[in-house]
């Protein structure tokens, strides 16, 4: 069985949000176009406490874009974003969440970030999504959402590692691109790791065939 996974389609990642992804709202019509083809749709929310370690505001003397060592791994510092229960953490207001059957919230531990929908960045704790998808009989996940070079990429890599077939919908993702080309490099990394890259127009046909 297939599932559609909508990654972090939240107000703060939209062009006017706290951590803007240019053209981020372009993923919404792609999500809408794909929804009718899927029986199971899962959406993730980046869901940080205000004292989250990924916020530059919680590291005096730093600014967004700086990189710090957090428990032995490089952590990019971000503007405050997706603070639990804030409007920025809500799903994009134009997205139809009616068909969404399950929501995964991640990045809730103040001490560690979680780009992936499956694991935190140190692979210490699971979000529960692996078990949920297995219980539902899912073997293949289609990814749409934000951002290509962070949460989509790490969700794709962890999904493959967890044994799922992962399909990234190329026109349904957008990148932060802190360095130009990050988005394209992320897609290449996903492809090298075993993900399939498709365009949304081919998804319905692919699933029929
Ligand atoms: C994300 C940076 C920080 C993402 C989340 O959803 O890609 N990026 N938090
Ligand atoms: Zn975040």
Image: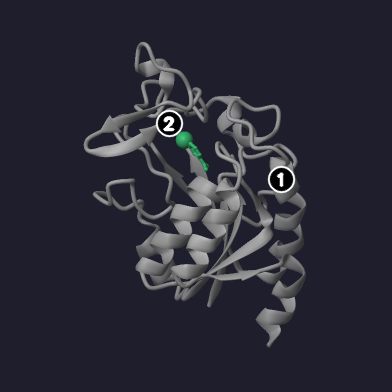
Q: Compare residues 153 and 182 and report the one nearer the observer.
A: 182
Left or right, 194 with respect to 41, comes to: left
Left or right, 37 with respect to 129, comes to: right
How many other residues sit within 10 Å of disc 1, few (<14), some (14-19) or many (≥20)? some
Question: Quadrant location of residue 13?
Answer: top right
Residue 103 percent across, percent down from the top left: 50, 50
Q: How is the image coloured?
A: one colour
Residue furthest to the top: 61
Mark 2 vs mark 1: give the one in front.
2
Placement of the C terminus among the 4 image quadrants:
bottom right
- Residue at the disc numbered 1: 95
Helix, strand or loop status at disc 2: loop
In this view, 15 is above or below 182:
above
Give the mark nearer the N terminus: 2 vs 1: 2
Q: Which mark is residue 48?
A: 2
The residue under the point 52% across, 27% down is: 81
Left or right, 117 with respect to 15, comes to: left
């Amino acid at each position: 069985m297939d599932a559609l996974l909508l990654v972090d389609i939240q107000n703060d990642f939209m062009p006017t949000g706290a951590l803007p992804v240019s053209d981020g709202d372009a993923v919404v019509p792609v999500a809408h176009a794909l929804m009718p083809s899927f029986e199971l749709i899962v959406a993730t929310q980046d869901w940080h406490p205000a004292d989250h370690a990924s916020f530059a505001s919680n590291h005096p003397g730093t600014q967004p874009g700086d990189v710090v060592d957090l428990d032995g791994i490089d952590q990019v510092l971000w503007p405050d974003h997706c603070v639990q229960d804030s409007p920025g953490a809500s799903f994009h207001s134009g997205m139809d969440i009616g068909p969404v059957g399950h929501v995964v919230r991640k990045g809730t531990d103040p001490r560690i970030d979680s780009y992936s929908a499956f694991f935190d960045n140190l692979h210490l704790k699971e979000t529960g999504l692996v078990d949920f998808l297995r219980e539902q009989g899912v073997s293949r996940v289609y990814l749409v959402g934000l951002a290509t070079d962070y949460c989509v990429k790490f969700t794709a890599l962890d999904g493959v590692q967890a044994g799922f077939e992962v399909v990234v919908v190329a026109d349904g993702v957008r990148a932060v691109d802190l360095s130009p080309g990050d988005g394209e490099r992320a897609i290449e990394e996903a492809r090298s790791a075993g993900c399939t890259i498709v365009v949304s127009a081919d998804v319905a046909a692919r699933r029929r065939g």
